[in-house]
């Protein structure tokens, strides 16, 4: 499984729009092939920072996700609304336990 | 690396206390040996649900973390304040890319 974490810090004037677009992206992504989970959260230590946590079946599914025109539009829009560069990190992961 | 995700859903009357205890736990955990990152967030789709994302050097560091008395107290307190059973998932993970 591929785990993706990402974050974007909005500006005070762009936060509501970044949050709205992020939720739209989450909901759309969940219906894509190979998407196991996709969610967005607000950092408790920075109310302008949104943090994504995603699980994808494999690298190919994630590559296809990145190529979806709506994904590309989302990333481009985020860049124009963010206070700083966004970050995305990919992990090759397998679940070892559920407590 | 071990990635840990966890979540707890508070009750409306316990949310502020759950959030306070969670941040205290995050800050304390960051100083423990083998803790690479530790953070807590609010689910954008459920304002009562807190979601943790943690990175630990290895399984031994995480086992030591679970044995810290303050960690055990935190888990016990959360159980009394949560609206539903908490979940914790452990992943064996390695970073493959940073975009």
Image: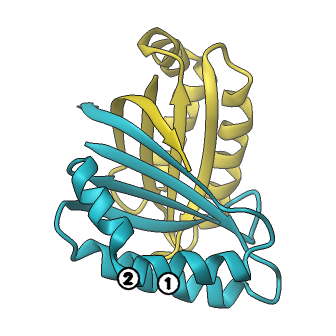
Chain colours: A cyan, B yellow
Q: Residue at x 51, y 75 (%)?
A: B44
Q: Where is residue B74 in the image (x, y as percent from the top left)?
A: 57, 36
Q: Which residue lies furthest to the left in this view?
A: A33
Instruction: Report which quarter residue A51 is drawn in.
Output: bottom right
Q: Residue at x 23, y 58 (%)?
A: A61
Do residues under tags 2 and 1 come within 8 Å of each other at their CB atoms?
yes
Residue highlighted by disc 1? A73
Q: Is residue B22 something that shows in the picture?
A: yes
Q: Where is residue A11 in the image (x, y as percent from the top left)?
A: 81, 79
Q: In this view, does A83 lie to the left or right of B3?
A: right
Q: How far apart are marks 2 and 1 (CA)?
A: 6 Å
A72 and B8: which one is in front? Answer: A72
Residue highlighted by disc 2? A69
Relative to B66, does residue A83 appear above or below in the rendering?
below
A67 and B77: which one is in front? Answer: A67
Q: Is residue A99 something that shows in the picture?
A: no
Relative to A18, does residue A93 appear above or below in the rendering?
above
Q: Position of residue A60 (x, y in %)?
A: 23, 53
Assign the C terminus of chain A to one quadrant of the image. top left
Are there few (<14), some (14-19), or many (20+) residues within 10 Å of tag 1? few
Identify the secondary structure beneath mark 1. helix
Identify the secondary structure beneath mark 2. helix
Q: Position of residue B2 (x, y in %)?
A: 43, 25
B14 and A9: which one is in front? Answer: A9
């Amino acid at each position: 499984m591929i785990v993706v974490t990402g974050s974007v810090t909005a500006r005070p004037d762009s936060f509501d729009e970044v949050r709205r677009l992020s939720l739209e992206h989450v909901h759309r992504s969940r219906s894509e092939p190979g998407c196991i989970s996709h969610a967005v959260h607000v950092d408790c230590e920075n109310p302008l920072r949104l943090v994504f946590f995603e699980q994808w079946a494999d690298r190919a599914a994630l590559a296809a996700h990145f190529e979806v025109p709506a994904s590309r539009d989302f990333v481009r829009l985020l860049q124009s609304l963010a206070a700083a560069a966004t970050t995305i990190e990919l992990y090759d992961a397998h679940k070892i336990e559920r407590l």
